[in-house]
Amino acid sequence: MNVTRKEQGTRLSMKTYTIAVIPGDGTGPEVIREGCRVLDAAAAQGKFHLEFQPYDLGAERYLRTTETLPPTVLKELTQVDAIYLGAIGHPSVKPGILEREILLRLRFELDQYINLRPVKLYPGVWTPLKDKTPEHIDFVVVRENTEGLYAGVGGFLRRGTPDETAIQTSVNTRHGVERCIRYAFEYTRRRNKHKKLTFCGKTNVLTYAHDLWQRTFDEVAKEYPDVTTDYTHVDACCMWMIKNPEWFDTIVTDNMFGDIITDLGAMIQGGMGIAAGGNLNPEGVSMFEPIGGSAPKYTGQQLINPLAAICAGAMMLEELGERQSAQAVEQAVCQVTSSKLKSLAAGKMGYSTSEVGDLVIEALA
């Protein structure tokens, strides 16, 4: 597209954000393409500019070069304003390689210590919970993202023998726990819904790790007298998310439990086609992504739902400080789900992937 001198001058005067785009594998590039189109439309309305920088990371690069995340690329990613990720993973690559060497490495190297997962039922979206509507399912999970069982501390003894022993240690530091809990309190206050924060743990069994979590939670809570607090065991949390999701406003939890309950949350909000998440470093570079996988069997068929990627883009705008534009994108998604789509499932939406992107852009206008 040709850009006039006047348009170039206008762009130079606008606030510009540099966004690293990692389309990923399978259908990742298809949904990210629609997300970028929606973000461009939102930026034009919001009078700011997004400069997208694509990065070739994923299965194709690994199979071609055996590279996952080269040091030079990692260094570049530390300099951008945010990262927009499609999905990583492909059946042609052994499970765990790309996930560990790209996804987990980015989280750890960029110190993205918060995983933020809104669980929101959009209007018109089916939920498996009987008699529950959007007013009942609208909460956020704040998950610690760099410690716990995912820290990778452990090993094998006598591997491959009948006496084999495997040990995986959950690492919980006061520093890591406190910064996650403090972020959760600040987010709860800023969210301004019910100002209620629930700590989800297992204090009756994990008597060391979650004793640290509970004591830290209680101490930090004294600094936030306007925030109501409570506690739930993780097993009870899973039950109440199904029976009474309206009880929750914001939940804070550790890495493993957060991984589990957020997938449960995705199902009650209508499935992976609408679930978005952010890996945040509030003081550095954050990464935003649709929660669903790369769905390689649908590659190139224009059947996959891009709304999760679009919602992840809205989360990115909010984190960048463009809150009004983020809300505009979310409202556009609400319009599309409430009046246009037959289903969120791949191939059953009534529209192609790119047509859904068109619908959101039309709703934005």
Image: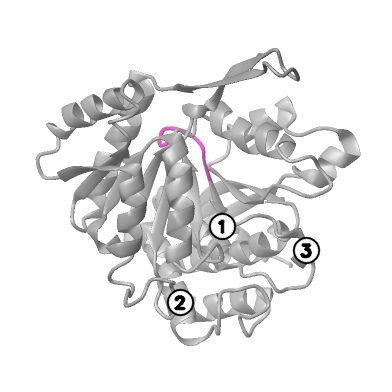
Task: Decide which of 311, 42 is in the foreground and name it.
Answer: 311
The magenta stretch is 282-287
Residue that carries the numbered disc 1 in the rendered image? 11
Question: What is the spatial separation of the Cα atoms under label 2 and label 1, in whole angstroms?
Answer: 41 Å
- The residue depicted at 33 percent of the width and 65 percent of the height is 137
The N terminus - image quarter: bottom right
Residue that carries the numbered disc 3 in the rendered image? 297
Of circles 2 and 1, the one toward us is: 2
Sequence-first disc among 1 and 3: 1
| Overall secondary structure of the magenta section | loop
- The residue depicted at 45 percent of the width and 33 percent of the height is 113
Q: Quadrant of residue 330?
A: bottom left
Give the numbered dot on residue 126: 2
Q: Residues within 10 Å of mark 2 (few under 14, many from 20)?
A: many
Q: What's under tag 2, amino acid-wise?
A: Trp
Label 3 sits on a secondary structure element that is helix
Q: Residue 347 in the image: state x and y as whole percent.
A: 68, 77
Question: What is the spatial separation of the Cα atoms under label 2 and label 3, in whole angstroms?
Answer: 24 Å
- 34 to the left or right of 247: right
From this viewpoint, is residue 144 visible? yes
Sequence-first disc among 2 and 3: 2
**Residue at the front extreme?**
162
Label 2 sits on a secondary structure element that is loop
Of circles 1 and 3, the one toward us is: 3
Label 1 sits on a secondary structure element that is helix
Q: Residue 228 in the image: state x and y as whole percent.
A: 14, 46
Task: Decide which of 337, 49 is in the foreground and name it.
Answer: 337
Question: What is the spatial separation of the Cα atoms under label 1 and label 3, in whole angstroms?
Answer: 39 Å
Residue 225 vertical placement versus 206 (above, below): below
Q: What's under tag 3, amino acid-wise?
A: Lys
Task: Decide which of 330, 290 is in the foreground and name it.
Answer: 290
- The residue depicted at 72 percent of the width and 47 percent of the height is 89
